[in-house]
Structure formats: C-alpha cells, structure tokens
Image: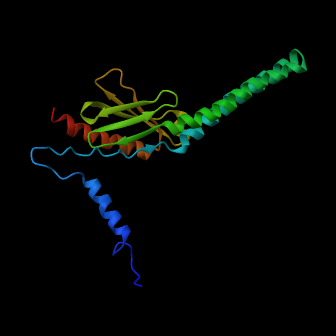
Amino acid sequence: METGSPDDTGTAGATRAAGAAEQAGPAEQPGTAAVPAREEPVWTGLPPGLLHMRRLLLVVWLGLLTLAAGVLPALFLAPYWAALALLPLALLAWGWVMLGRNWRSWRYAERADDLLIDRGVLWREETVVPYGRMQLVEVTSGPVERHFGLASVQLHTAAAATDATIPGLDPAEAERLRDRLTELGEARSAGL
C-alpha cells in the first residue's frame, strides 16, 4: 500500500478538480457571452469598543434613573414605592441585549466600485455608495468617542437621503478608510 497525499491520487484530488471546474463555469459556446461571476463582498464588523461604550452609557443613565426611582419615592412616600426601580432595571436588561444585537448587525464591505453598509435588526438596510458619487468623506469623533478611542466615518453624496455612516471604528481604521474612499472617489469621478 502506498502512502501519499490525497492530491496525488484518489478521490480527494478528483473532487478538488471537479470543484475547480465548477467554479470556472461552463465552457463558452459559440455565440454566447460569458457572464462574470459576482464576487461575494468581504464584510468587516465594528470593533467591540463601540458596544462597550454604548453599554456603559446605558448602565450610567439607567443606573441613575433606577436609583432615583427607587430611593426618592421610598423616602418621601412609602417603602413599597421602591418597587418602581424595577421598571428601569427591566429596561436596562432589555437595552443590554438590544445593544448587542444592534452592534452585531452593523458591517461594511469595500468592493471594486462601491462601498456597502449593512445594518439593522428588525428592518435591515443595505446602503450602496458608489465611489464616483462621493463628494465628501469625513471622520468625526465626539468627546465620549475619543475617550473610548473611537471615530465615525460619514460619507456625503449628491443624494440628500443618503445616510452612509460607519460608527465606532478605531481612529487609524477610520483614517485609512477615509483616505482610501477619497482616493477611489477622485479616481472614479474623474471619468464622469
């Protein structure tokens, strides 16, 4: 019995060759045009720093509300009014889960001719921004975002309804994306 890799002989090599033939597509017949296969975009998710920032803000604001809803009525009315604190606590638990789902739903992909931004939990939105239609790409970072080391990239196009923002990126990635999109936008718009 010979030993060797499945690529040398055997069914694995034949299966791999058949798979490559399928990916190559059918042979062109005279009189038909080959349709290029549309490549699947490579999606990039948002960094976890955005989720940490949003959850911390949720805990701070609803923690203060829980404290106020529990302590103040108990001091001024009756101790059983402290049960009002359960409502903000339930809202905190629900918000914690929803923020995680929302964070996981955001992703973007750079393709050859456009940028895709996909987001949404209940209502999915996919925004396609052609590089040639971009007029302005800006990186913004508010005080809370700067504290957490985050920045957002906002794309402006000729269409007023375009909401193309990628929140919560690392500043280096936001600047790289801004520079790349600006470069591609200038190259594509020169041909218009």
Residue lying furthest left: 31
Instruction: Say which of 18 and 118 sits in front.
Output: 18
Residue at image location 37% in from the left, 34% down from the top: 138
Residue at image location 20% in from the left, 34% down from the top: 189
Asked whether, in this view, residue 146 is left or right of residue 96, the answer is: left
Tally the marks.
0
Residue at image location 34% in from the left, 43% down from the top: 110
Asked whether, in this view, residue 82 is left or right of residue 30, the answer is: right
Instruction: Say which of 95 and 61 sits in front.
Output: 95
Asked whether, in this view, residue 115 is left or right of residue 46, the answer is: left
The C terminus sits in image quarter: top left
The vertical placement of 44 against 72, above or below, is below
Asked whether the viewer can see residue 60, the reply is: no
Residue at image location 52% in from the left, 43% down from the top: 149
Residue 116, percent from left and from top: 36, 37
Colour scheme shown? rainbow
The N terminus sits in image quarter: bottom left
Residue 38, percent from left and from top: 28, 44
Asked whether the viewer can see residue 19, the reply is: yes
Residue 78, percent from left and from top: 90, 17
The vertical placement of 95 against 30, above or below, is above
Residue lying furthest bottom: 1
Location of residue 10 (image quadrant): bottom left
Location of residue 15 (image quadrant): bottom left
Residue 21, percent from left and from top: 27, 58
